[in-house]
Image: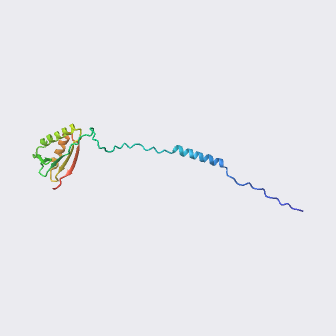
Amino acid sequence: MSRRRRKPPEEAEPGLDMSSLIDVSFLLLIYFLVTSTLDPKEADLGMKLPTTEAKASNPVEIDQMTIEVNAEGHILVEDVVLDTDTKDRSVPLLSAKIGEYAQAAKMMNSKPLVVVKADDAAKGQRFVDVLNALAGVGIENVTLTGFTEK
């Protein structure tokens, strides 16, 4: 009796279907193209470089005014004593001086700039009187500094 040996059936080589992978890769490519943002081109920054020519449109700058309130409550403008009566809260000489300054700045199309220096020993009310006088003529650009020793 002869026995025949049967050969096991040949197994097919395992394979990978590439068509589905290609479809997925194209879908991912389309997704990233649609959702990404493109960098905008560099635009002009609008910088104006200084030139040697003077333009007539530049406003004339007016000098700042310095107002000092010393320890006695006297009000000085550019080292000239104006109001010494600490009981007079309307500070008429100062109001007239800063009114002229505001008018000059307005005529030159410039913003008035005032620096107020107050001594630490000065009464707070006198400082408030100066600020009220500035607000009365419409000056908004005010710099507050401390009193410095010379």
In the image, is residue 46 above or below residue 145? Answer: above
> How is colour applied across the structure in the image?
rainbow
**Extreme-front residue of the structure:** 52
| Front residue of 27 and 1 | 27
**Marker count (numbered):** 0
Residue 34: % across, % down: 53, 43
State which quarter of the image contains the C terminus.
bottom left
| Front residue of 21 and 124 | 21
Identify the residue shown where x is 55% and y is 45%: 31
**Extreme-left residue of the structure:** 85
In the image, is residue 12 above or below residue 138? Answer: below
Identify the residue shown where x is 12% and y is 47%: 80
| Front residue of 118 and 58 | 58
**Extreme-right residue of the structure:** 1
Identify the residue shown where x is 18% and y is 50%: 117
Residue 81: % across, % down: 11, 47
State which quarter of the image contains the N terminus.
bottom right
| Front residue of 136 and 59 | 59
35 lies left or right of 47:
right
16 lies left or right of 112:
right
Residue 95: % across, % down: 15, 41
Residue 130: % across, % down: 17, 45
Identify the residue shown where x is 19% and y is 42%: 134
**Extreme-bottom residue of the structure:** 1
